[in-house]
Image (cartoon, grey):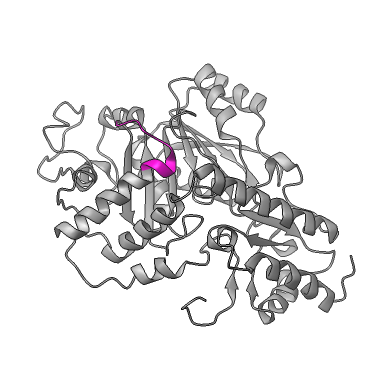
Amino acid sequence: MSSQPQHPTLLIPGPVEFDDEVLQSMSHYSEGHTAQPFVNCFSETLSMLRRLFQTTDPASQPFVISGSGTLGWDQIAVNLAEKGDEVLVLHTGYFADSFADCFETYGVKATQLKAPIGDRPQLDEIEKALKEKQYKLITVTHVDTSTGVLSEVEGLSKLVQRVSPETLLIVDGVCSVGCEDLQFDSWKVDAVITASQKAIGCPAGLSIVMASGRAIERFKNRKTRPASYFASWQNWLPSSSDFANLSYEFQTDMFLLVMQNYEAKKASYFATPSPQLIHALHTALTQILSKPLSERFATHRNVSQKIKKTVTDLGLKQLASKPENQANGMTTMYLPEGLTPPEILPNLLKRGVIFAPGLHKEIATKYIRFGHMGVSVTDPKRNDIDRALESLKAGLADVGYKS
């Protein structure tokens, strides 16, 4: 029995429902961010993130910084690209537009390779684009929250290695890390950005990044100072001695081994972290890693297939119509002709379930989004998914829809 106050079940593509122990961790008493007990907690959290991302390479570097997942875009744009650089953004929905806009904010030239709504750019199209121009980075949204489209990272990585090996592969994993398989080392990914509030199952407020050793070397060799203060890795990573040979000039007294020191259980400081959020993330990661990741991914996949079968049986079409394009942590479904989200979502809320309206600007009034990740999927004591499916059937019936 949950200790949380009674509330509608939140089944949007993030934030998600939280486990009681995670929320209890958020109530941790106040402690200093350089006090040894908190430093130990932060160290264990960073080490567990390596396991979640499936990296054992000591050269890879996790970052956990106070902020939303959006801060991950800034970290990539200001640290791994420079003004005038060319980057290729693979477009599967709203969030590719936003990532491209972030790059352009810092003077980086972003070219978008777009697919039809519900689909993803094909490998032959990507290969053609990579051969036409030298790109510093290529970015892919692993799961676009606006469309529910799942991109295939492993095949993309092999293509980039073959056609444009100097291009860094960047994965936006905000809606995938924790519910989709993402093998950082094996797939030779250079950076993944994510956030705390989706499949990881921790309250919002933490920007999480895993960078490869190759990405860190690219940062070290940049020619100009990063065009951000808070998001600059020069303030989160190294000491002046570690980066003595950087090719651009800067003040070294701000350089701190913040992330590396915390992981080594040494107190460090650049900007104050949130101890309570770190404790909550520690609890969430402990729960996730208590079982094999393969089992967790299989559970999300099985529940996703059950949901998608029900959606199909109801006569509804998915935005991602091809099975290989369908995410395992969310489902996007077109509403029956003439029905809009404001007509169906209140009916679901009356039954204690919250879905999300459409987000893709071209079709926002035509579809809704069902998030199914985290404890709503993995906790066998919860019946969130079954209640949601029954509510969907009843809510559609309330407005006269017959499948």
Q: Is residue 56 magenta?
A: yes
Taking the spot 12% from the left edge, 36% from the top edge, the residue there is 240
| Image location (x, y in percent) of residue 152 | 60, 35
Left or right of 148? Residue 334 is right
Residue placed most toward the observer, 150 or 118 = 150
Specify whether residue 356 is in view: no
Specify whether residue 194 is in view: yes
| Image location (x, y in percent) of residue 139 | 50, 37
Residue placed most toward the observer, 139 or 316 = 316
Where residue 361 sits, quadrant-wise, is bottom right
Seen in the picture, residue 113 relative to 199 is either above or below; the reply is: above
Taking the spot 15% from the left edge, 51% from the top edge, the residue there is 268
Left or right of 265? Residue 74 is right
Q: Is residue 214 magenta?
A: no
| Image location (x, y in percent) of residue 336 | 83, 64
Seen in the picture, residue 394 relative to 144 is either above or below; the reply is: below
Check the image and name the residue furthest to the right: 402
Taking the spot 75% from the left edge, 70% from the top edge, the residue there is 390
**Total marks placed:** 0
Residue placed most toward the observer, 307 or 345 = 307
Left or right of 61? Residue 175 is right
Give the magenta part as a residue range: 50-58
Check the image and name the residue furthest to the top: 162
Taking the spot 67% from the left edge, 31% from the top edge, the residue there is 122
**Looking at the rendering, in which quadrant would you find the C terminus?**
bottom right
| Image location (x, y in percent) of residue 163 | 54, 18
Seen in the picture, residue 302 relative to 107 is either above or below; the reply is: below
